[in-house]
Amino acid sequence: MAHEFRLRVYYEDTDAGGVVYYANYLKFAERARTEALLGLGISQSELHERLGLLFVVKGIAVDYRAPARLEDRLVVRTRLTGLGAARILMEQQILREAELLVRCDVALACIGPEGRPARMPASLRETIASLKAAEPRD
């Protein structure tokens, strides 16, 4: 199922024009991905300590559609769109109520201690697979 992370836009998130600075949407998306994994019982720090594995962003495509403003309440919806042995693909939507503001397509790589791609244990892949959801209402 898709994960939802709620947040409020603070003054520190905005630029001189009073809208959310474009790079801050990436921070919102990162927080939402972390919370989605934590919600599944996956702590990235524990994963690194126990297995030497890390998830890193390999690529991200961002489509900015409308700005968020100071004190807006936003929802970041995260869903799995693909899962490989060492790769995770996610779609993230940042919404204000029902309005889609930003869409991100994120490719994550699982890497080992040497910084090279590393296969995820089957149990980890099975847990992450639960983030798969029906197609979004875009």
Image (cartoon, grey):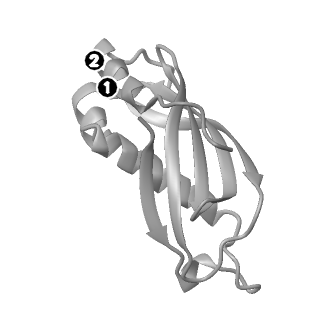
Q: For mark 1, what is the residue? A: 127
Q: Nearer the viewer, residue 62 or 93?
A: 93
**Cα distance, mark 1 to mark 2?**
6 Å
Q: Residue at x 66, y 72 (%)?
A: 68
Query: Is residue 122 visible in this depiction of the protein?
Result: yes
Residue kind at label 2, given as amino acid type: Ser
Q: Are marks 1 and 2 in contact (CB under 8 Å)?
A: yes
Q: Residue at x 70, y 85 (%)?
A: 18
| Quarter holding residue 11 | bottom right
Front residue (pair 118, 29): 29
Image: 91 above or below 13: above
Callout 2: few (<14), some (14-19), or many (20+) C-alpha neighbours within 10 Å? Answer: few
Can you say which quadrant of the picture contains the N terminus? top left
Labelled disc at residue 25: none
Residue at the spot 65% in from the left edge and 45% down from the top edge: 104
Quadrant occupied by the C terminus: top right
Residue 86 vertical placement versus 62 (above, below): above
- Amino acid under label 1? Thr
Task: Label 1, secondary structure: give it.
Answer: helix
Where residue 45 sits in the image (x, y, percent)?
29, 43
Is 70 above or below relative to 130? below
Q: Position of residue 97 (x, y in %)?
A: 57, 65
Residue 26: x and y in percent read: 60, 56
> Could you tell me which residue is drawn at 50 percent across and 37 percent down?
79
Label 1 CA crowd tier, 10 Å (few <14, some 14–19, many 20+):
few
Q: In x, y percent, where is residue 12? A: 56, 81
Above or below: residue 97 compared with residue 47: below
* Towards the viewer: 55 or 2: 2
Image disc number at residue 123: 2
Q: Secondary structure at mark 2?
A: helix
